[in-house]
Amino acid sequence: MKAIIFFVCLVLTGTAESVFAEKYVIGLSMHFMRDDYAVKLVDTVKAVVAQHPESSVVVTDANATPQKQLADIENLVVQGVDAIIVIPIDEKAILPAISMANDRNIPIVAITTIPNAKVLTTIAASGDYANGKASGELLVRATGGKGKLAMIGIPYSLWRIDERERGFMDAIENTGLEIVVKQSGLDQAKVQDTVAGILVAHPDLDGIWCAFSNQLVGAADALRSANRKDIALTGIDADKAIIERIRNGWITGTAAQFPEQQGRMAAQAVFDHLAGKSVPVAYEVPVGLVTLDNVDEMNRKIWGE
Amino acid sequence: MIAAFILMVVVFSILSPVFFSYGNFINIANQTAIISVLAFGMTLVMLSGGIDLSVGSLVSISAVICALLLDAGASTPVAMGVSILTGVTFGGLSGFISVKWGVQTFLVTLGVLSVARGLSLVLSEGRTIYIDSEFFLSIMAQGYIGPVPVLFAWTLLFFFGSWLVLNLTTFGRKVRAVGGNIKAARQAGVRTNWIIIRVFMISGGLAAFGGLMMAGRLSSGLPTVGVGMELDAIAAAVLGGTGFKGEGGSLVGTFFGALIMGTVINGLTILGINPYIQEITKGIIIVLAVVIVSIRK
């Protein structure tokens, strides 16, 4: 037991930074921290905070678990941070913690909409619907507007993903495209297997749409294994693995999210508010489609490389 | 174990001025409550020589059923009763299958984990079901009894309840006897099968109650909630000195095991430690604790 205590002390003294003597402490409650989007967003917020002397940022990772994110935000509130940036994993489950922050007058900046929450501002409020629609329209163009589609969603309902699906459905409405199979999966390997199965069951498939990053990569790899470059594949997110597959022709195109831009807007909104400036209730982020034609330019724009 | 917990509190308090505050203790109490309740059930199961991997999924199915029933206009006691009964039934089923066909509880409950998770996704159609019953929310999770958050009050209630069952009833002694040496227990006339089934019913019921607490805490029934909680419950029991072959084990130890795990994560978050490092720290603490327990033996 002494060893445990010793170890804990060691970790704390080794890595703890004193964040309490500082002017502003910003909490950043991440939904998940294991993809390029999340990592870039965290890095950007940290970079903006670093430009403000005597300010610091505390990052928490909900690891895709709603109850962990609830606890994370509670901990940030008790810690007395000056503002909290939230990227929600489940928009309903974190509402009790948001209202706890409201009670203490801690401003909340939401990245994508949190319905029914009292927030200072929302970044990329309509981004999910717009991205779903743009990626759907790209699929319509790529297939010539007729044929059979597979749609990959997630196994449960999340507001953000529902919005993307709604945009996608609106885009293919009144076209000759028909959804012949709808499946779901969260991790890349599972989606790869699922799509491989779909290709066997529906050899005459014309297009596939995916709701987010891991699915696009998994679906692209399934197409590669089956050597089916004739099937159009679009979706949302532009992780580096997706950029790579667009270059190689396995993904037709994707509606990118801009973690750098979103992170910068969120952090800037926080500092503007703390400095007493007024902040708009919503920031819109325009849709950015990545296709083979503009892949290098967009890669620079999204990832700065 | 208690000394370790106090030391940890002291260390965090020195490093952070806000750690030792009423608001933060409420956070820790709320954040460890559900794991503690699951871990009490897990301790009983482990003392009887088994393991229950299904509790995380039972949390979600109970939360989903309760939210659906409340949404459909059922009264709070009915919704809660049906949810708890579901947990007890699943637990009883795991115990029954295990003793009837001599299957290891690890394997049976691994199957139940998957069935219960799938079922909660089917029942909820994957949606988050919002709960707006103020009464339910306040008695399950968001209310206070004096200065004590109701989640922690439930934890204490179940702590004393399971402590009484384990230490002051013949049932409790039989549980230990079954876990210690099942053949000897059988020869001594203990109906070992029935003991095991009942232990699993208790664990399932506690997990379902944990699901109600979770539903109250999140104001919603989520089919995705509780993933991996069985491992945290096992870790809390093991930190508290419970072994995998029914040896050692006390509910006091388990309680503090859960508190230590919750406090570590809370303290590290408050100190602004990188979340990746938090995972590593939690893992190392568990391994160290197990090593220390086995060195002592």
Image: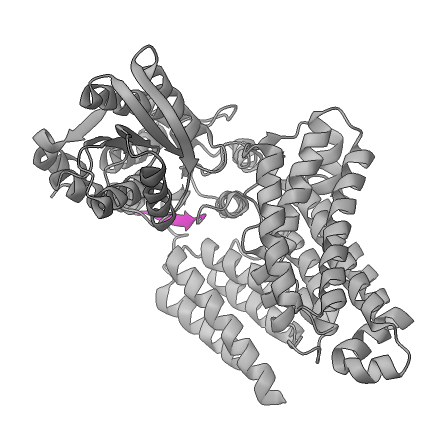
For residue A146, what is the image quadrant?
A: top left
Relative to B70, residue A222 above or below: below
Q: Is residue A69 magenta?
A: no
Name the spot of residue B11 as percent of width and height, x first: 52, 68
Left-right relation of A214 to B257 = left
Q: How many marks overall?
A: 0
Residue at 51% in and 63% down: B12
Magenta stretch, residue numbers: A51-62
Examine the rendering and report whether any part of residue B28 can be seen.
no
In the foreground, A114 or B142: A114
**Residue B137 relative to residue A158: left or right:** right
Task: Find residue B236 and report its horizontal and vertical position in percent.
Answer: 62, 66
At a point 41% along the width and 31% down the height, the residue shown is A182
Nearer to us in this view, B13 or A301: A301
Task: From the viewer's side, name the closer residue of A298 and B106.
Answer: B106
Residue for point 80% across, 29% down: B75
Using the rendered view, name the quadrant where residue B182 is placed: bottom right
Question: Could you say where residue A293 lies in the image, as x and y percent from the top left?
Answer: 8, 29
The N terminus of chain A - image quarter: bottom right
Residue B192 is left or right of residue A58, and the answer is: right
Q: How is the image coloured?
A: one colour
Q: Is residue A208 left or right of residue B238?
A: left
Residue B107, position in %: x, y?
Answer: 61, 64
Residue B70 found in image quarter: top right
- In the depicted view, which residue is nearer to us: A75 or B86? B86
Classify B13 as above or below A181.
Answer: below
Residue B288 appears in view: yes
Task: Specify the quadrant that holds the C terminus of chain A.
Answer: top left
> Can residue A58 be found in the magenta stretch?
yes
